[in-house]
Structures are given as structure tokens and as C-alpha cells.
Amino acid sequence: MAIPKILLYYVFTPLSDPEAVRLWQRDLCESLGLRGRILISKDGLNGTLGGDLPALKRYLRKTREYAPFKQLDVKWSEGTGLDPAGLSLDFPRLVVKVRDEIVSFGAPGELRVDAGGVVGGGTKLSPAELHALVEERGDDVAFFDGRNAFEAEIGRFRNAIVPDVANTREFVAELESGKYDHLKDRPVVTYCTGGIRCEVLSSLMKDRGFGEVYQLDGGVVRYVEAFGDDGLWNGSLYVFDQRMSVDFSGHVAVIGHCTVCGEPTKNMLNCRDASCREQLVVCPACVAADPPACSAHTAA
């Protein structure tokens, strides 16, 4: 019986020939019938793949045979399904690219990576260690969302600070704006979906004078594996595939509100303008009535 799964993974490690890695990864995925998105740079590998569980396990075993990728940070989740050809329904195609950054903060020259990963990043906290920090330091702990602002509309840590950014490339200017200088003497816990964005964000924050910076190791995905909806997380988790969002229990709090009618919803929708990548929180009824555009394309 086919078992649809999604594999989320990354590793920061120096790569001397990213293009050779790209060709190898593309051929490996195609041979196994996997779909998804893989980014490669001189600083490492970042991917999300969907497919049948045995194929994904073979992919992971083969990829980890390459010494620099032996320490891949890996997370699993349930896929929606497979088509008659056995291909993932959660991804329309396979994309494997070489980029300046495997997560695009627009600061490739600032990131420092060695065989052990990112140099100068925040202190990593397991979910249990995060709870211990909050228990010890209480409300002094500031949760800092390392995702795009729209992702936080349907789920976030309680009382989290959500920077007003539409994409990761806006974080550097946001950090340098002075808005968050009051956090420079407080414990700041950065978090994101799977942990990769905070590897970079926490190092950018430390370089800009934030003194006590932590990162949630493995991101929200690993946190909810441990605590589900009975900890400090509130709502659904936005994901960058056809699922749009995932829940972790049968009693998920719905914290999003439809941008059209204001009704509570976790439903996400692409802006109706085909050139726009912005996501909107829109309830199914308003989607059926008239799918909206974002504010930048409302007049279109």
C-alpha cells in the first residue's frame, strides 16, 4: 500500500561544487519519482519533497551517504495523497536550483558556515529546554517570529512578536529599523517552520547587538511533535505546498480571520493576481463568492 509522506530537511555545510550537487539531486529525485523543491548553495542544502514513503527513505539514505550531508536535519509529515502514477499530490513538479542562499535573507556575504553548521548563530533549544527557559525567565522571554507575517495570521507562539515582513529579504532592514532595540537586553527566542530560517536570522540578530538570542531547534514542526496544541503554540501551521496549513490535534484554536468578512478561519488563498505571491486568509464562503486580491492588486 502506498504511503504518501512529506520530507522537510536542511543542512548548513560548505559545498565546493553546488552545480554538481544539483545535477546529482535532480537525477536522484527523478529516479525515485519524487516531487518538491530543493535549493543548493555554497552554504548547504534545503529541501521539501513529497512521495511514497519507501522512495523518500531511499532518497534520504542515498543523500546521507554523501559525507557533508550526513547530519541532515530531517522532519516527516503526512502527505495528502499520490496520483495514479505514484507522484505526490502536494507538489506540482520537481524543482532543483542553485541559489546564492538556501534561505533568501539577501545577505549571502554575511553568513558564516563551517563543517559544524552556521557560525555565530543563536543557542539552540529543544522543545523541553524552551519550556524550561520560559519557566525560569517568565514574561521576560520574547518569542520572535522568523517567518513571513502572513504565516503568523493562522498560527504563532503566544504573545509572539511578528515582524511586518512579506518575505525573508525584508528582515535585515526590519532589524536595523530600531523597532526591536528594546529586545537587545532580553532573552529572544526565534522560531520558524522547520528551523532553517532561524539558523540565519539568529546570527543576523547577534551581529546587530541582540545579546541573548536562542533558536527553537527544529522549528515549530519539532515543537508540536513534542507538545502538540497543549503547549505554547496556538493555531495552525502554514506550509509551502498544496496543503497550505496543517493541524496537530482535534482541538486546534482558529486564530485567523477572513480578510473579506472577518469570520474565524485558517483557510489560506493565493492572491488572485497570477503575478503575486502573497497569501491571504480567506474563508471558504468568500473564496466561493469572489476570490479576493491582496491590497496591492485590489484595483486590478
Image: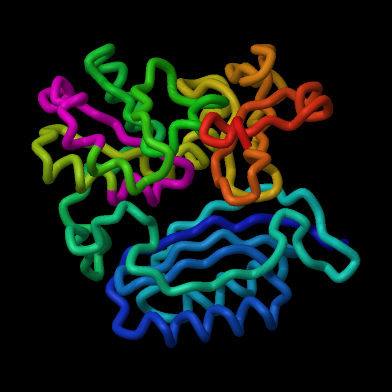
For the point 55% across and 46% down, which residue is it?
Answer: 277
Q: Nearer the viewer, residue 136 or 236?
A: 236
Quarter holding residue 294: top right
Q: In which quarter of the image is the N terminus?
A: bottom right
Question: Is residue 188 rendered magenta in the image?
Answer: yes
Quarter holding residue 235: top right
Q: In this view, does 274 lie above or below 155?
A: below
For the point 72% across and 68% down, which residue is it?
Answer: 54
Q: Position of residue 252 (x, y in %)?
A: 65, 21
Outermost residue to the right: 84
For the point 44% across and 24% down, which residue is it?
Answer: 157
Q: Is residue 32 above or below residue 113?
A: below
For residue 74, side relative to residue 188 (left or right): right
Outermost residue to the front: 299
Type of colouring: rainbow
Quarter holding residue 30: bottom right
The region drawn magenta spans 174-200
For residue 249, side relative to residue 289 (left or right): left
For the point 56% across and 74% down, which residue is it?
Answer: 61
